[in-house]
Image: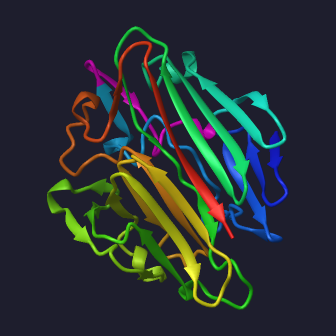
Amino acid sequence: MTVIIKNDYLQAAINEKGAELTSLKANEIEYMWQADPAFWGRHAPILFPFVGRLKDDQYSYKGKTYPMSQHGFARDEMFQVKEQTEEKVVLVLESSEKTKEVYPFDFLLTVSYEVWGEGLRVRFEVDNTGDDEMLFALGGHPAFNVPMDKGLDFEDYFFSFSPQKSRVKIPLEGPYANLDQKTLGQTNTNIRISHDLFQNDALIYETKGLNTFTISAEDSPHSVTLAYNHIPYVGLWSPYPKEAPFICIEPWWGFADTVDSTGKLEEKPGMNRLAAAEKFKTQFSITVR
């Protein structure tokens, strides 16, 4: 089932499967990628309880090995609508015997979407409902149509960043992060978008404080901006070598296994730790014009 929320400017559609944002319309323009499987069959999956790929698609915790596909299982689970108004919807996913087969923690994941003015606010809450410390990663993966305008091409667009400063860049070797090869990414200026920009997979940056990432074009009044505060990583991605007409801006609280990963969850970098009965809260916003 798809839930629609809207105001006088913006309309968003959210699928109960995966609590996935599937449409964001304004100015008679569809800003969200429409999941053409020829390129990538998703719109904006929620990444939980892992971000990225694990070595051999598995991990171990307290001596037991668990299978886990890329980006975790939440994107394929059915969420329940807990609350809905014209401008807001709240969806929840609770741990179950099924989730415990691959992830041995008790949790409640709450995702809310709310339209306000020209923007959409996306909030996450993770509750540790168990008795033990919980380890998890979390991520957004929204994909935006590029070009947004008729008559423009993919290469007519560029990334702009605020604050306009260099950020630490984490390179990938295959699907795995190489933390020993970090460099300083030149996000102190605009970056022209091209398909070749993603030939080594996602561009991953460490981020601190308030950050905004915008996709726009000089000859267009339309743009997409994703903004957040205190989220540690962002991934910018479009599939390569496919010349896909979309780009993802992905706020992450975690990242893939490293090239030297031991496979032990207790040793995995980037994971969040939540004590019993504690709650983790975070959010980001998407603004379109």
Residue toward you, 29 or 20:
29
Q: How many marks?
A: 0
Residue 113, above or below 108: below
**Vertical position of residue 105 compared to residue 43: above or below:** above
The part of the chain drawn in magenta is 61-76
Nearer to me, 142 or 99: 142
Asked if the stretch drawn in magenta spans residue 74, the answer is: yes
Assess whether residue 67 is covered by the magenta stretch: yes
Residue placed at 25% from the left, 28% from the top?
266
User: Which residue sits furthest top?
Assistant: 131
Picture quadrant of residue 225: bottom right
Where does residue 66 sit, x and y in percent of width and height? Answer: 38, 27
Looking at the rendering, in which quadrant would you find the C terminus? bottom right
24 vs 139: above or below? below
Residue 153, quarter of picture = bottom right
Q: Residue at x 47, y 44 (%)?
A: 71
Where's residue 148, x and y in %? 68, 77
> Left or right: where does residue 168 sit relative to residue 56?
left
Q: Residue furthest left?
A: 180
Along the line of sight, the residue nearer the viewer: 277 or 258: 277
Which scheme is used to colour this image of the protein? rainbow
Q: In x, y percent, where is residue 24?
A: 73, 59
- Taking the spot 51% from the left edge, 43% from the top edge, the residue there is 47
Check the image and report above or below for 50 versus 109. below
Image quarter (top left, top right, bottom left or bottom right) of the N terminus: top right
